[in-house]
Image (cartoon, helix red, strand yellow):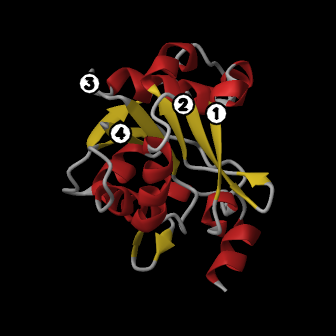
């Protein structure tokens, strides 16, 4: 199954006060760290959506073999970035794993775990990881949902679309807290580093 990665890295990081994409995580910018984990997994390629701090984010990605696309409407929020990224994916993609730039604990091992779970039920509309009853990210969405997801506007994620296809979603229980660990504020960032 051809599952591609889609890394959303276009946000303005308003609550963080500085671009989350460029925070130093284990010696490299966060966006480069997450892109490298995705590229080390069994994903069939990676597309990165950039917007805010675009020049620096592109530079941070360096020579990583990822397709980089610009979301000119990044200020509108997550929905616009998701739509931009989905439009840029290869036509032969069966599904996309949507990765968020503020989840530094997501690893290639976790990505592969989610790929395996999705491939075990290839007719599913989506896979959402769950840790201790809490839904998380990254999610995998079937190509059958790409059109619906491209209609999202503002800071709306996939949740509204998932609600319509609730019967066809795999809720994958994982023991990896990375799926619910994100950094939106300086406090959360400091806590994670400690």
Q: Earlier in the sequence, mark 3 or mark 4?
A: 4
Q: Earlier in the sequence, mark 1 or mark 2?
A: 2
Check whether the beta carbons of the residues at disc 1 and disc 2 lie within 8 A of each other.
yes
Tag in front: 2 or 4:
2
Q: Earlier in the sequence, mark 2 or mark 3?
A: 3
Q: Earlier in the sequence, mark 2 or mark 4?
A: 4
Residue at x-position 67% and y-position 21%: 165
Residue at x-position 64% and y-position 29%: 158
Q: Earlier in the sequence, mark 1 or mark 4?
A: 4
Identify the secondary structure beneath mark 1: strand
Q: Residue 190 appears in which quarter of the rendering?
A: bottom right
**Pointer 3 local density, CA inside 10 Å: few below 14, some 14–19, many at least 20:** few
**Pointer 4 local density, CA inside 10 Å: few below 14, some 14–19, many at least 20:** many
Identify the secondary structure beneath mark 3: loop
Q: Marks 2 and 4, Cα distance to the nearest angstrom?
A: 13 Å
Please, is residue 93 above or below residue 35 in the view?
A: above
Residue 82 is at least partly visible in this image: yes
Q: Quadrant of the N terminus?
A: top left
Q: Marks 1 and 2, Cα distance to the nearest angstrom?
A: 6 Å
Tag in front: 1 or 4:
1
Q: Marks 3 and 4, Cα distance to the nearest angstrom?
A: 9 Å
Of 120 and 71, which appears nearest the observer?
120
Q: Position of residue 98 (x, y in %)?
A: 50, 41
Q: Which mark is residue 124?
A: 2
Task: Tell me the residue that label 3 is attached to.
Answer: 92
Task: Tell me the residue that label 4 is attached to.
Answer: 3
Task: Tell me the residue that label 1 is attached to.
Answer: 169
Identify the secondary structure beneath mark 4: strand
Check whether the beta carbons of the residues at disc 1 and disc 4 lie within 8 A of each other.
no
Q: Marks 1 and 4, Cα distance to the nearest angstrom?
A: 16 Å
Residue 7 is at least partly visible in this image: no
């Amino acid at each position: 199954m051809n599952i591609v990665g889609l890394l959303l890295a276009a946000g303005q990081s308003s609550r963080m006060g500085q671009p989350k994409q460029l925070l130093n995580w284990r010696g490299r910018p966060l966006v480069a760290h997450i892109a490298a984990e995705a590229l080390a997994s069994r994903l069939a390629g990676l597309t990165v959506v950039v917007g805010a701090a675009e020049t620096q984010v592109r530079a941070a990605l360096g020579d990583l073999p990822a397709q980089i696309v610009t979301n000119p409407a990044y200020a509108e929020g997550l929905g616009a970035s998701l739509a931009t990224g989905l439009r840029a994916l290869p036509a032969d993609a069966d599904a996309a794993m949507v990765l968020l730039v503020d989840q530094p604990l997501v690893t290639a091992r976790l990505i592969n775990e989610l790929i395996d779970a999705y491939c075990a039920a290839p007719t599913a509309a989506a896979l959402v990881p769950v840790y201790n009853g809490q839904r998380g990210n990254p999610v995998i969405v079937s190509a059958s949902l790409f059109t619906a997801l491209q209609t999202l506007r503002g800071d709306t994620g996939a949740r509204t679309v998932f609600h319509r296809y609730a019967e066809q979603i795999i809720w994958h229980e994982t023991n990896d807290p990375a799926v619910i660990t994100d950094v939106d504020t300086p406090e959360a960032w400091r806590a994670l580093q400690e």
